[in-house]
Image (cartoon, grey):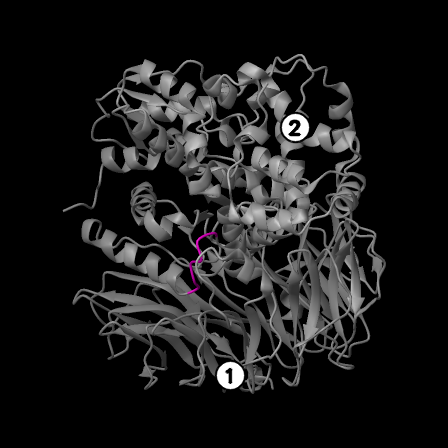
Amino acid sequence: MKTIADRLIEDVGLRRGVDRLTPEKIQKVFKELVAGECGARMKTYMETCVRCGMCAKACHYYMSHKDPSYTPVAKVSQTMWRLFDADGKVDPKVIYECAQVAYTECNLCRRCIHYCPLGIDTGYIISVVRRLCHKLGVTPQYIQDTAHSHSATMNQMWVKDDEWPDTLQWQEEEAREEFPGLRIPLDVEGADFMYSVIAPEPKFRTQLIYQAAAIFNAAGVSWTMPSTPGWDNSNMAMFTGDSEIMARIERAHYETAQRLRVKRIVMGECGHAFRAVYDVGNRWLGWKWHPVPVVHSVDFFWQLIQEGRIKLTHKYAEPVTIHDPCNIIRGRGLMEKLREVTHFLCENVVEMTPNREHNYCCCAGGGVINCGPPFKNVRIVGNSIKAEQLKATGVHTLVAPCHNCHGGLEDIISKFGLNMHTKFLGDLIYELMEKPEAE
Amino acid sequence: MSFAQSWDFTPGVRVVLDDMRQCSREYEWLEEPHVSPDGERVAMVAALPDPALSVAVNGEVWEATFEKVWYPRFSPDGRLTVLAQTDGEWTMVVDGEPWEEQYAYIWGTLFSANGDIIAAPIQQDGKYGLSVNGTPWETLFDNANQVTLSRDGSAAAAVVQVKSPAQADIAAFQEGIFSVAVNGVAWDSIFVNCWAPTFDPAGKNVATTIRRSLYDYSIAVNGKAWTGSYACAWGPVFNPATGAVAAPVRKAGAWGMAIDDAMAWDIRYGQLWHQVFSPDGSKLAAIAAVSFGDFTVVVDNTPWDIVFPVVTDLTPSPVGNRFAALASNHNSDFAILCDGKVWAGRYDMAYPPVWSPDAAHLAVTVEKAGRFTVLVDGKAYPESFDKCFDPAFSPDGSKVLIRAVAGGKYHRIVAPVAAFTG
């Protein structure tokens, strides 16, 4: 069987980190991590896995490469078991291999949980490997740079404090030409909800902010966006294993909502950000649940439709298919609401097979796409199963309510020549909705 | 300095603005209402059909118009500031008069306690810093954020980027590229990160959270780092009496309080933040999780014996040693906490507590089923409103100024504390 050692890819961040390690340092950090942060959960998983291999066909990497070393159990075998077997005292090159597996060959999509007869969460185990690699200073360059941006600016794209409100004002100005009187309301204390987005939106997908403003304007809802840091709901530090920065970002996000006295946070169409806000950061900070309720756009659009606040001029005629983003489907159970919204918008919805909680990952999530060019090819080839799944639908329009999914799917569409294009729900709603104030 | 000495505290209800939509000029919209501290004026951004933007104060539109206007804020001494753009350049406009200096962008207005100093972060030619009363720092930086102004306005500080590594040069970043600049002069010391710089009350000293490596958090005071190394640390505060610096720090998965580079409170909390000293510095309080998901207020390392899923807005009294805070069940069922006791009512939302100057009374604006009112010492004003702004006490603490909107009218209400009976 091949192993990770047979396919190592050179990365500045991984190499630099490993070059400074010794087996003794690795062991010390490993033992501290296991004793201090893992507890019964890791021990249970380590002791209950029977190596049955049922998880193999759950993993898009394995299904694409057909190489057993890509199976979830093999990924654990090549990382955490290896470390446990050596009591953490391993050669630094092992950490390089662990890091490449953990950061670039597992999307933390958690599909394999559904196939494990014992319910082992391989994504959790791989997250702990990432945490170890972070503590050892062995992280891929590009995602580490993103984590640095988070720490310095509280957003992942180095958007500076002036660029954010300036961009919102620019989008408001643009949108007013189509919707006279439209506002992107900044810092409105007591609004019903704070709308937060990921930093790539102001950086290079500003039309999504425009569209959201248009939809909220037409729906007549009470909303606001903060003009201050805390607006970015993304969190790549969660994926590098830097829990401290992850938490600092989530604190800023939640405290911004608390300061504005909103009833809830509505998040744009992003999956990993939802995971960070909804499931991870809040708990690290000590809250059992969410200090401010959090609603993903899929859920929010569903609510607007239920309330009759979104009215369409027509339905989207071309057949569409739905991609179920891992973090809001397996992570939040929004599969039926996603379908209800999509069917409301589109005349002809063709389901992928498998779908809902069994859908294949886009292969971009879990921070994998953020690890950048060195690992791009493995990532894309590692999802030929997704390409086959897409192709089998025979449609050209792919609805995916997640930014990372768009990135990953567009790469696959391009690589495999699928003649498809991706759309957010917001794209469709904006395109199809009545625009009451349009001239 | 209390500007409230000059405010009208004659008990009664006065309609200041008969119609929140009234405007001396034709307009497309009026938004972002802000009310002056004395409650006498309502300012709103006005979109005029020209098209242009301006500011309406009690319905009277300024003569000056701009391409863009945002962030109307009243200074403590009652001056109205907005941020405005003309010919693509931004500046601060104070009571209708623009600063002479213009910038590529300006945001986040700050005031000194007595209002005579107005400052704001600026960006000019891709460089960042502050402008104080219209005078920009002599040195601007590749980035400046987390700006803060000393209480008397004599000093301003920001986290500044002092080195500019190439894109994705993670090694250079981890060698340190950030510092704190005070009045535009950066400390000599450089860190991987700096967060939440804060002044002492005199504006002479600055403390900040630092990260010396990805794993080594600590506190630096005037550029000198503590020797203590922690897994994480939140922003520091100064003791107003002694000048000691207190900061929550994390070790071995739990939080404690460090003061002047030594542990002062046990490492035993699931979370610890928003620490505040009493005005005389004799008490230190903070919001803490005493176990997972159970938040309360801790005073001098002793938790109150009530816990909630969420606690926010810890507010010390201006004199004495009293503390108030808000609690909620994940942003609903808000309760008001005062000196370890819980007021009886529960609300859909609550706003930051306001103490009377003598600390004898506590006022809180609350919302329930879309209606606002003000509580004093747990008892509600008998009427509710469409919207209430923060209440204010008279200098002697016997009366409360309520600034409220109801039925499209803006009301200025002065009520004796005894009138809060609900």
Q: Can you say whether A26 is above or below B406 in the image?
A: above
Q: Which region is colored magenta? A: A156-161
Q: Residue at x 60, y 79 (%)?
A: B188
Q: Check disc 1 and report the residue beneath it.
A: B115
Q: Which residue is mark 2?
A: A78
Which of B245 and B97 lies nearest the eye of the viewer? B245
Image position of A237 with respect to A431: above or below: below
In the depicted view, which residue is nearer to us: B204 or A367?
Answer: A367
- Residue extending furthest toward the left: A439
Horizontal placement of B77 versus B355: left or right?
Answer: left
Which residue is located at x 49 percent, y 57 percent?
B169
User: Which percent across, then down, holds residue A276?
Assistant: 56, 41
**Tag 1: amino acid:** Gly
Residue A26: tell me if it is visible. Answer: yes
Q: Residue at x 33, y 58 (%)?
A: A167
Tell me how many marks there are.
Answer: 2
> To which quarter of the image does residue A438 belong?
top left
Do the residues indicated by labels 2 and 1 lie within the same chain of the protein?
no
